[in-house]
Image (cartoon, rainbow, N blue to C red):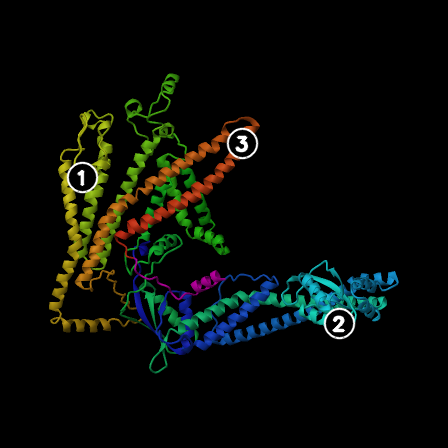
Amino acid sequence: MGAMFRSEEMALCQLFIQPEAAYTSVSELGEAGTVQFRDLNPDVNAFQRKFVNEVRRCDEMERKLRYIETEVHKDGVHVPDVKEAPRAPNPREIIDLEAHLEKTENEILELSHNAVNLKQNYLELTELRHVLEKTEAFFLAQEEIGMDSLTKSLYEIRSLMSDESAQQVANRGRLGFVAGVVQRERVPAFERMLWRISRGNVFLRRAELDKPLEDPNTGNEIYKTVFVAFFQGEQLKSRIKKVCTGFHASLYPCPPSNGERQDMVKGVRTRLEDLNMVLNQTRDHRQRVLASVAKELASWTIMVRKMKAIYHTLNLFNMDVTKKCLIGECWVPTADLPNVQKALADGSNACGSSIPSFLNCIEADEEPPTFNRTNRFTRGFQTLIDAYGVASYRECNPALYTIITFPFLFAVMFGDLGHGAIMAMFGAWMVIKEVPLSAKKSKNEIWNIFFAGRYIILFMGCFSMYTGLVYNDIFSKSMNIFGSAWKIPYDDPYMQANQALQLDPKDSYIDQPYFIGIDPIWQTADNKIIFLNSYKMKLSIIFGVIHMIFGVCMSVVNYNFFKRRYSIVLEFLPQIIFLCLLFAYMVFMMFYKWLAYSTFNEDPAYRQGCAPSVLILFINMMLFSSAEPQDECKEFMFEGQGIIQRAFVLVALCCIPVMLLGKPLYLLAAGKKKHNAKPENSNGSVNAGIEMQEQTEVGEGEPAPAAKPAPGHDHEDEPFSEIMIHQGIHTIEYVLSTISHTASYLRLWALSLAHAELSEVLWSMVLTMGLKDHGYIGAIKLYVAFCFWALFTLAILVMMEGLSAFLHTLRLHWVEFMSKFYSGLGYIFQPFCFKTILDAAEDEE
């Protein structure tokens, strides 16, 4: 947990690697995942780098693997998962892997080509069989009639023609015909085209196939129709064949005699049986080949992706002047420097290199990346902070405190013991089933968001159960565990005389408060809303001011770490004084009012009705005005309060020019002093630079110098006018935001009250409907009412209200809390890690 306080120290290192050991060394660094490389060739085109040919080879192998994977999935062959990811193959194994992939691809291509040819032959024979079988009815009808009935039908159609034309048609003799199949959706257009090109001289008979056929190329189902077109004349025959070609209709020979057709059908069926047997054998052989390939497919994919990542990384390296050594630069956490040195040594030993690789830490001219080492528990909270902005290098990390403050502020708005228990059980289930659920790797984005925040959900549920106990609220009902501190006479005369139950401490309070939280008797009071309204509104202001004070105090940690101790006096002190004298004082008045004013106080000036409004007091304090007291009551809570309030406002106003002018004037004076002292210390600075450069060379076993902390983007090197502008903006923003942010915490009160009232409305309007009747009807109504109540509770109160409270809590941390000390201008540390690369590739798929 200590690593979460601020980002880890980073070192900029140079790697000197022999070319023969470069591949294996980078492979070891990828397995370790602790190094972020810098591009030393930013001006070199990607196609002109040293290892571009190797990258192209990897791309070609990836293409082959994608084709193999497509064929495997097409046949429904299961691809087993890899239990342990294989390491990147060495350069000798790459050649064998490339040859094996080439052989496998060619074998699958040949099998696919043969299968397509066999399926094409099978399709043609199937269509021929259907043509012979379907057209049998057409020719049988002709033979039964004893004359060419089709010719007669055609003559009847031709009766509309002139006598001379009809006589010419009759002299031509018997009709010719063309038989084949065409796709079903093209039949209407096919008929119209035949009618147009023949002017109605073609007689078309067709029959649809009952079962679809399989497309040899795609495997999709296609529906076709058998047709026979009768005509007269060779010229018309050529026209019909052209139309069939245009509509991609397949024409098949069909003998005119019955005997020839029967013999042909028998021959076609025999060939179909033989071809079907060959297809089954081909399919079985293809299944065996793909099954053997599927066992290694996942491993091959991982190996090729690792190879490609290694060569992409090597393209970031540069050659030395002798072209005998590869030089790379990388950011490394100082705690992981021994691991990097070990990875380099293992890489050199793996290739048998006699010259070891060297690691040299150098001075950084730029701000290092931000790296916060997290675990499964803290990763979700760190993600919430990084979503707003990555912390500057070595800046104080708010994620550590968010672990407690985030679920607590959420619970203030979502305080219900029952709803919190539902959320806590859901989070606990995800935590307990963490390993099997993470292994499934779901593609559902919403589920992945929930699962990534499982510990946040668990904490939000647990904290909501606690605040629900404090609010004494469980599904809008209260629990009387410790006994009520109120005595209400529930007799008939009292109930008849009082239509509504109003709790008044004068009559019924016994001055023994409930042990924890709110007394359950308030659940039956009509003035419950008035009481809870004041109670939760004051709590929200108290928590908000404490949260903001904590955020301002966190800025001291950054000022001290970045050696800007002058900001503690010139920025932190006026900020904290301004905040405490105004808003922390308002919180003090709330507590004083709770303690001083009581029904049982004998002083008439401090009786219950004389308690002044804290809001009115605060407004009069800011306006330097006063209000007239009523009866025996006093205007202020204690003696001298008016003088103290005026002093507080004046001191707070005096803090504003200090915040505005203090830092710019100090930097102006410090800059002049530094400018005057620069010639005297020039030699000393040069010597110090030489000494620092000598200390950068680090051998094995020696501590590495960490990168210097960034100045926190303080604009110290800018001109005085720029510093004044930035400081003026920050001062105005802080003063105005202190007021607006305090009011913004009232969302804790508003959402908590809305959640409680919505829960009560849902109980009284839905579940109560099933509790009014008795007997079987009442049981059925209760069952239905409970189903609707449970559905609305989960959908509205837990899901929608939970999401709303989550977003409001996120805003309170991002804006109201983190703006007091957090700049968030860094960039994330993205190490070269095979696991991250493989996970990203799987997500893209």
Residue 555 x %, y %: 24, 53
Q: Say which label, 3 or 1, has the lower sequence index.
A: 1
For the question of whether residue 427 can be seen, the reply is yes
Where disc 1 sits, the SS reads helix
Query: In the figure, is residue 435 to the left or right of 666?
Result: right
Q: Which mark is residue 237?
A: 2
Q: Say which label, 2 or 1, has the lower sequence index.
A: 2
Where disc 2 sits, the SS reads helix
Where disc 3 sits, the SS reads helix
| Amino acid tagged 2 | Lys
Query: In the figure, is residue 384 to the left or right of 639?
Result: right
Q: Say which label, 2 or 3, has the lower sequence index.
A: 2
Q: Residue at x 26, y 71 (%)?
A: 696
Q: Residues within 10 Å of mark 2 (few under 14, many from 20)?
A: some
Q: Quadrant of residue 593?
A: top left
| Amino acid tagged 1 | Met
Residue tagged 3:
781
Q: Residue at x 14, y 59 (%)?
A: 666
Residue at the limit of the structure toward the bottom, as seen here: 322
Residue 204 is a magenta residue: no
| Amino acid tagged 3 | Lys
Mark 2 to mark 3 CA distance (whole Å): 78 Å
Tell which tag, 2 or 3, sits nearer the viewer: 2
Query: Magenta part of the protein: which range?
Result: 824-845
Q: Nearer the viewer, residue 380 or 779?
A: 779
Q: Residues within 10 Å of mark 3 (few under 14, many from 20)?
A: some
Residue tagged 1:
621
Residue 40 x %, y %: 34, 74
For the question of whether residue 277 can be seen, the reply is no
Q: Residue at x 41, y 67 (%)?
A: 30
Residue 581 x %, y %: 19, 43
